[in-house]
C-alpha cells in the first residue's frame, strides 16, 4: 500500500474515532453492531485496506506522535485493529456441524472408535483407561448425543464400557471430517464422579502421534478444573505444554468448550471466554486433524470408587467447526 493511501485511510479513521458514540473501547462485540453504529458502516468498505495497514501500525504510531493533528488517529489504533478482526470473523464459514437432532448417530459424520480398533477391542491401551468403547453405549435423543458409561466387566484390566465418537477412519469406514486450522466448539454436560474422564480433542488424520490438542479434558475428582494441553515432538520424545482453568462445576450444567487453532497461536475458550493461549508457533500442529469426543473411565487422578454412579451420561448438545474464529 502506498503512503498516500495509508494517510487517506488514517484520515478517514480519525474522523470515525472522533465521531462521538461511534467507536469506543469495548463497544464492538459482534456483527450486529454495524447497524447500531453508523461510523462502522463507513469503515466497512475499507476493511481489506485496514488489514494491509495493520503491519505498519507501529511505524505509523511513531510518525503520528510527531504530528499533533494526527494524535486522534493514534488513539484510535486499537479500535482499528478491533474492526479489522471483526471483519475477519464475519467471514468465518462453518465447515462441520452436528446438532444431534435425530434419533440415531449420523454415520456420515461420526465413527465410534479409534482408527486402530476392530471388532469389540476399542480402547486407548496403556493410557490409564479402564473402559472398552462400544456402539451400544452411544445414543441420540432429545437433541443430545448421549455417551453412556456402564459398570460392565470386559477383561481383567477393563471393568467398564463407554462411548466415543470420532471423525477418524475406523472399522472399515473412511474419515468423515478433517481440517487444518479453524475454530471448534462443543456444548456439553459432564457426568459427575471420581474416575470420569471425558475429553474433546484433536489428533492427526494421518495416524501419527504426536501432535495432539486437548480442547477440553476433565477428571471427576476436580469438577471445576479444565485441563488444556498441546502435545508435539515425536513418539520417542513427546513434548507437551499444559494449563488449567478453574471455573464452574462442569457436571452441574451445560458449558461450551472452544478451541481456536491458528498457525501462530492456539486459544482455548470456556463459555465464550479466553482461558488460555499458547503462541510458540514452532510447536503448533500444521497438518490436518480429526475430532474426537469421548467418555473414558480412569485417568491420572484415580479410578471410580463406590460413590461413583453408573450408568454415567455425558450429554453433548452440539459439535461445530468453522474455518476461522466466528464470534
Image (cartoon, rainbow, N blue to C red):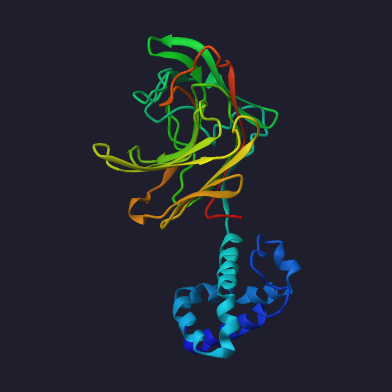
Could you tell me how many numbered marks the image carries? Answer: 0
The answer to whether one can see residue 292 in this image is: no
Q: Nearer the viewer, residue 260 or 204?
A: 260
Q: Quadrant of residue 126?
A: top left
Looking at the picture, does residue 202 appear above or below residue 33?
above
Looking at the picture, does residue 230 appear above or below residue 193?
below
Percent position of residue 101, x then y: 68, 34
User: Residue reaching furthest left?
Assistant: 236
Q: Nearer the viewer, residue 219 or 310?
A: 219
Percent position of residue 263, x then y: 41, 56
The answer to whether one can see residue 33 in this image is: yes
Q: Nearer the viewer, residue 68 or 242?
A: 68
- 209 sits to left or right of 320: left
- 90 sits to left or right of 134: right
Looking at the picture, does residue 41 appear above or below residue 162?
below
Residue drawn at x 66%, y 83% is: 15
Residue drawn at x 56%, y 89% is: 68
- 196 sits to left or right of 139: left
Percent position of residue 190, x then y: 58, 29
Which image quarter holds the C terminus?
bottom right
Residue drawn at x 25%, y 39% is: 237
Amino acid at each position: 500500500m502506498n503512503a498516500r493511501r495509508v494517510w487517506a485511510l488514517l484520515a478517514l479513521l480519525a474522523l470515525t474515532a472522533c465521531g462521538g458514540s461511534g467507536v469506543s473501547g469495548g463497544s464492538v462485540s459482534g456483527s450486529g453492531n454495524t447497524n447500531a453504529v453508523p461510523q462502522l458502516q463507513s469503515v466497512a468498505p475499507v476493511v481489506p485496506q485496514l488489514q494491509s495497514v495493520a503491519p505498519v501500525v507501529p511505524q505509523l504510531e511513531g510518525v503520528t506522535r510527531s504530528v499533533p493533528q494526527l494524535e486522534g488517529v493514534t488513539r484510535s489504533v486499537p479500535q482499528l485493529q478491533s474492526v479489522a478482526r471483526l471483519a475477519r470473523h464475519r467471514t468465518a464459514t462453518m465447515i462441520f456441524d452436528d446438532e444431534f437432532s435425530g434419533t440415531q448417530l449420523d454415520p456420515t459424520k461420526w465413527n465410534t472408535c479409534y482408527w486402530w480398533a476392530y471388532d469389540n477391542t476399542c480402547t486407548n491401551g496403556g493410557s490409564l483407561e479402564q473402559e472398552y468403547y462400544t456402539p451400544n453405549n452411544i445414543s441420540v435423543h432429545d437433541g443430545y448425543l448421549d455417551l453412556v458409561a456402564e459398570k460392565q466387566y470386559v477383561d481383567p484390566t477393563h471393568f467398564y464400557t463407554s462411548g466415543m465418537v470420532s471423525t477418524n477412519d475406523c472399522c472399515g469406514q473412511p474419515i468423515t471430517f478433517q481440517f487444518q486450522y479453524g475454530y471448534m466448539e462443543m456444548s456439553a454436560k459432564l457426568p459427575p464422579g471420581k474416575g470420569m474422564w471425558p475429553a474433546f480433542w484433536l489428533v492427526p488424520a494421518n495416524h501419527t502421534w504426536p501432535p495432539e490438542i486437548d480442547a477440553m479434558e476433565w477428571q471427576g475428582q476436580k469438577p471445576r478444573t479444565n485441563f488444556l494441553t498441546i502435545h508435539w515432538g515425536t513418539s520417542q520424545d513427546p513434548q507437551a505444554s499444559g494449563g488449567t482453568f478453574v471455573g464452574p462445576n462442569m457436571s452441574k450444567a451445560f458449558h461450551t468448550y472452544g478451541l481456536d487453532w491458528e498457525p501462530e497461536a492456539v486459544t482455548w475458550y470456556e463459555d465464550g471466554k479466553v482461558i488460555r493461549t499458547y503462541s510458540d508457533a514452532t510447536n503448533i500442529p500444521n497438518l490436518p486433524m480429526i475430532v474426537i469426543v469421548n467418555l473414558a473411565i480412569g485417568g491420572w487422578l484415580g479410578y471410580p470408587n463406590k460413590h461413583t454412579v453408573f450408568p454415567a451420561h455425558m450429554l453433548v448438545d452440539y459439535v461445530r467447526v468453522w474455518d476461522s474464529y466466528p464470534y
